[in-house]
């Protein structure tokens, strides 16, 4: 076994794992604060990727420049989703919120399919796409490295925002105990709305980077969403740090394990890992 | 909760209506629709036991469905064993598997449980996809055998399938009804509402969750066997898919989880919606039918968050106030 191959695998696992982390952080935020499993999360990712692709294709705007716009757009999609789909079902059994986001997911996916068609689309001319860096015999894809860096920065920004800002404190209070937070004068509905926006914005960042090296098609969000559900549970629900580390772990397991055991088992490995972890630590790796 | 008499009358009328319907309307698509409706109503009722009454949301019921389907189809395909034995074996295996899954999984709470069931389902699907004896990802076809009840195979009529589905639905509903007012039913609801309080009152919560899952798994497997024998072809990508698991949850949530008639109402809304939108709007490959379906699901949630049963209750309440 060549050491460089192993290192190369670890690096690619790490790079994609950091992207998983950010998507999972967005999911865990919503989950932790509102106790809602957002089934449409993967479809938000797909929307981000599609917007980025369309910007590139129609206006020649490089994905890296359209990124800020996409993040803002996704933030507003998150706000709108909360206002029109989530808010009416708050306070009812959790299954209904699940059903609503699931319906939304079907709706978004098939609207995109209807208007844009099922084809796979790839960007291979952008500033980041298709270039590699080599360093000591190891190869780094420029687009993946940039994506990993961007995702780490965004995750860190979210972490800082939650731990240092006044709104972050309000958010954590709401996550711990909604009713008490309301009694303390926190506008929990606004916290919910912003959480949803923030969660969607995370996906916007991830999507804006992913489009440089990942094909865009209406079902693209599905795999990411499924993996991220597992990542969130693996890290412990509502735990940003947990989701971040679990994302990296899943990226590594998927890449390194997939290489040794066979690529068809790479998701199975992730699920088995989750089942093993959860049987030893019932609240995830970092849950309490 | 309904009284015994009320329940028996309602159930009797429904069963009679469902029994007569295919005799009056001989349109083959309509008969297919009715079979699917009854099948999904039975599946959702089985899920309702664990997900609705005991409050443990499972995203992995495809495991039991798939086990049932494979247990009936594999021996039939390989040895020509009568599917009735396969069905019984499937139910038994699913119950045992539920027991084995339950031991580690029921220490978990809420969402951890939901994701675990989902992970188990995905692992099992991968196992079946790579298991040569059941032809891996290609799946199994039912052999062509003499028609009749012994082989549970009918080529010219859908009626036997219809009545079998009806009987399965009837059995699950009776079991749910008996459970609802038994000691176990109260335990389930206590576990759903306040697990800590239930435990403090001396309810062995993991044991009763286990019971709920085992009963639910048994009936899900029976439905799985029936499905396999009805469509005559099964493969991991259909009978063990996340899609099946989710659909069961959707129907129950739509109808009203934890209520006796919720699953039937949910199936009566969702299945015709899906089938007819597919007949009228599908076929373009552009997913118009699914756009409509998604939009309707969202609208129902927004305007009637208690499920269809909520709508019915509101109607009753208004009538009483008049």
Image (tube, rainbow, N blue to C red):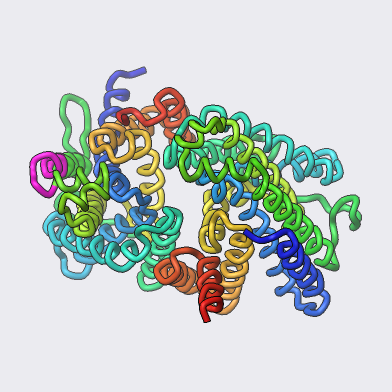
Q: Position of residue A63 (x, y in %)?
A: 17, 57
Q: Work out whether residue B202 or residue A152 is closer to the camera in this orientation and state it.
A: B202
The answer to whether A140 appears left or right of B30 in the picture is left
- Residue A124 in view of the camera: no
Q: Main secondary structure of the magenta part?
A: helix
A38 to B109, vertically: above or below: below
B34 to A102, vertically: above or below: below
The answer to whether B278 appears left or right of A20 in the picture is right
Q: Position of residue B240 (x, y in %)?
A: 59, 46
Q: Position of residue A79 (x, y in %)?
A: 23, 62
Q: Residue at x 25, y 64 (%)?
A: A77
Name the image quarter holding the N terminus of chain A.
Answer: top left
A262 to B259, vertically: above or below: above
Q: Work out whether residue B192 or residue B165 is closer to the camera in this orientation and state it.
A: B192
Instruction: Please give the range of residues in magenta.
Output: A156-167
Where residue A90 sits, quadrant-wise, is: bottom left
Name the image quarter holding the C terminus of chain A.
Answer: top left
| B155 is within the stretch colored magenta | no
Q: Residue at x 64, y 48 (%)?
A: B235
Q: How many marks?
A: 0
Where residue B146 sits, quadrant-wise, is: bottom right
The answer to whether A234 appears left or right of B215 in the picture is left
The answer to whether B242 appears left or right of A24 in the picture is right
Farthest residue to the bottom: give it: B322
B55 to A83, vertically: above or below: above
Q: Position of residue B115 (x, y in %)?
A: 45, 41
Q: Residue at x 71, y 73 (%)?
A: B29
- Residue A21 in view of the camera: yes
Where residue B86 sits, quadrant-wise, is: top right
Q: Residue at x 50, y 42 (%)?
A: B118
């Amino acid at each position: 076994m060549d050491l460089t191959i192993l290192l190369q695998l670890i690096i690619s696992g790490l790079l994609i794992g950091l992207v998983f982390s950010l998507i999972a952080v967005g999911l865990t935020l919503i989950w932790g604060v509102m106790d809602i499993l957002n089934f449409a999360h993967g479809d938000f990712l797909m929307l981000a990727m599609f917007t980025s692709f369309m910007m590139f294709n129609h206006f020649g705007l490089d994905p890296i420049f359209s990124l800020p716009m996409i993040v803002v757009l996704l933030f507003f999609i998150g706000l709108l989703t909360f206002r029109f789909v989530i808010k009416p079902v708050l306070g009812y059994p959790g299954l209904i919120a699940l059903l609503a986001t699931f319906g939304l997911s079907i709706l978004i996916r098939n609207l995109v399919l209807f208007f844009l068609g099922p084809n796979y689309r790839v960007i291979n001319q952008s500033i980041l796409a298709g270039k590699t860096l080599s360093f000591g015999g190891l190869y780094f894809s420029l687009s993946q490295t940039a994506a990993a860096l961007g995702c780490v920065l965004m995750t860190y920004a979210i972490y800082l925002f939650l731990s240092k800002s006044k709104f972050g404190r309000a958010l954590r209070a709401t996550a711990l105990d909604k009713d008490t937070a309301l009694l303390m004068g926190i506008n929990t509905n606004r916290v919910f709305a912003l959480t949803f926006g923030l969660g969607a914005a995370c996906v916007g960042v991830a999507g804006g980077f992913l489009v440089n090296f990942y094909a865009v098609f209406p079902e693209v969000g599905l795999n990411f969403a499924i993996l991220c559900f597992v990542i969130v549970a693996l890290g412990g629900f509502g735990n940003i740090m947990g989701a971040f580390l679990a994302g990296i772990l899943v990226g590594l397991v998927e890449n390194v394990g997939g290489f040794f055991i066979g690529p068809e088992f790479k998701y199975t490995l992730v699920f088995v890992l989750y089942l093993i972890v959860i049987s030893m630590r019932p609240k995830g790796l970092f849950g309490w | 909760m309904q009284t015994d008499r009320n329940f028996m009358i309602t159930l009797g009328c429904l069963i009679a209506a469902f029994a007569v319907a295919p005799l009056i309307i001989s349109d083959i698509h309509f008969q297919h629709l009715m079979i699917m409706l009854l099948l999904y109503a039975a599946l959702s009722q089985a899920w309702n036991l664990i997900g609705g009454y005991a409050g443990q949301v499972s995203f992995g019921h495809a495991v039991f469905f798939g086990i049932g389907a494979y247990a009936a189809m594999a021996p039939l395909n390989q040895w020509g064993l009568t599917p009735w034995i396969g069905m019984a074996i499937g139910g038994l295996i699913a119950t045992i598997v539920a027991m084995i899954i339950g031991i580690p999984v029921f220490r978990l709470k809420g969402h951890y449980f939901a994701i675990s069931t989902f992970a188990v389902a995905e692992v099992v699907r991968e196992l079946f996809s790579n298991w040569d004896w059941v032809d891996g990802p290609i799946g199994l076809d039912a052999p062509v055998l003499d028609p009749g009840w012994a082989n549970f195979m009918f080529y010219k009529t859908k009626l036997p399938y219809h009545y079998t589905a009806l009987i399965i639905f009837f059995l699950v509903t009776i079991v749910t009804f008996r459970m609802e007012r038994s000691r176990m039913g109260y335990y389930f609801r206590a576990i759903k509402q306040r697990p800590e309080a239930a435990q403090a009152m001396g309810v062995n919560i993991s044991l009763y969750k286990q019971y709920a899952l085992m009963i639910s798994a048994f009936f899900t497997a029976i439905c799985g066997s029936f499905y396999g024998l009805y469509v005559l072809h099964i493969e991991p990508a259909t009978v063990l898919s996340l899609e099946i698991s989710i659909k069961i949850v959707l129907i129950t949530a739509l109808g009203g989880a934890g209520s006796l008639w919720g699953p039937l109402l949910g199936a009566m809304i969702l299945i015709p919606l899906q089938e007819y939108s597919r007949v009228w709007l599908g076929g373009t490959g552009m997913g118009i039918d699914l756009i409509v379906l998604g939009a309707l699901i969202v609208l129902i949630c927004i305007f009637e968050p208690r499920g269809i049963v909520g709508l019915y209750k509101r109607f009753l309440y208004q009538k009483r106030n008049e």
